[in-house]
Amino acid sequence: MMEIVVASSNKGKVAEIIAALADLPVKVLALGDIGGVPEAVEDGLTFEANALLKATHYSAFLGKPCLADDSGLEVDALHGEPGVYSARYSGEAATDSSNNAKLLSELAAVCPQSRTARFRCVLAYISPEGITLTAEGSCEGLILDEPRGESGFGYDPLFYLPSLGKTLAELDLAGKNTVSHRGQALRNMAQKLARCLDENRRDQ
Ligand code: ITT
């Protein structure tokens, strides 16, 4: 069975990606299962550039098909910040809670209806044979003034979905994948990968 490496060291992302690809006839590995892989330098200016850069780096190093995710939060009142810098918003030693604290302090003077934001996700798949696929998704919401919920990761406890009356951290993994930026990108990517696998099978 073909192997695909989920090229991310973010455990929250990896769990969501593995769950969403469960129906594909492929063996999905995580970077953590392999070990000793040097980290990619993420110096792209867009989610797409960073996703392609990570998939290229890990696929070249491992000689295996790799699926990378670059994602982040765009807050309208902050002119799209933190964007591609979401993981390190509060500095090099950032944690989810220090990033959330910084976001709350930046938005302290912003009223509830102006706290609109979206998560974006770009996935990139690159195989050593030279196949490149990309897929994207986005999810609109509002930034609360205090965290709610324990699930998920990152900014999930502050990201409120008015249509559900819940934050992303109040959904379980399957519920989050149904509505999230990553879930949407993964459904697009799974269709593209399934088509690719079919074509490969027909050519053999
Ligand atoms: P990899 O590069 O190893 O995949 P990373 O966490 O550094 O891991 P990114 O550079 O793409 O990945 O940064 C994404 C950040 O955006 C992530 O650390 C969170 O702070 C935030 N983020 C992305 N998707 C999210 C989600 O579904 N829920 C909450 N926060 C999310």
Image (cartoon, rainbow, N blue to C red):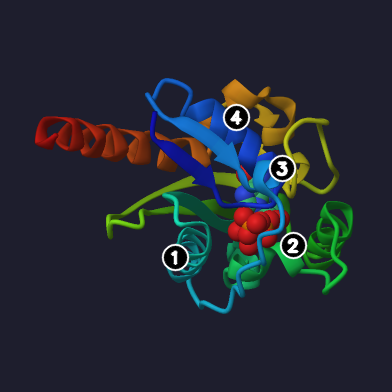
Mark 4 and mark 2 in contact? Answer it, CB < 8 Å: no
Assign a secondary structure to mark 3.
helix
The answer to whether mark 1 and mark 2 are in CB contact below 8 A is no
> Measured along the vertical axis of the image, is residue 112 above or below residue 39?
above
Amino acid type of the residue that numbered disc 3 sits on in the rendered structure: Lys
Closer to the eye: label 3 or 2: 3
Residue 67 place in picture, x, y as percent: 47, 49
Q: Residues within 10 Å of mark 2 (few under 14, many from 20)?
A: some
User: If the picture is divided into quarters, which one holds ligand 1?
Assistant: bottom right
Residue at the image point whose x is 66% and y is 60% from the top: 37
Cα separation between marks 4 and 2: 26 Å
- In primary-sequence order, the first of circles 4 and 2 is 2
Please report whichever mark, 1 or 2, sits nearer to the chain's N-terminal start.
1
The type of residue carrying mark 1 is Thr
Q: Please tell me in which quadrant of the rendered image residue 166 appears.
A: top right
Picture residue at 58% right of the left edge, 64% below the top: 76
- Secondary structure, mark 2, is loop
Q: In the image shown, does 165 or 41 lie closer to the viewer?
A: 41
Q: Is residue 160 above or below residue 49?
A: above
Tag 1–tag 3 contact (CB < 8 Å): no
- Label ID, residue 176: 4
Residue 180 placement (x, y as % from top left):
53, 37
Q: Which residue is mark 2?
A: 110
The answer to whether the beta carbon of the residue marked 4 is less than 8 Å from any atom of ligand 1 is yes
Task: Quadrant for the C terminus, please.
Answer: top left
What kind of element bears circle 1? helix
Nearer mark to the viewer, of 1 and 3: 1
Q: Which residue is mark 3?
A: 11
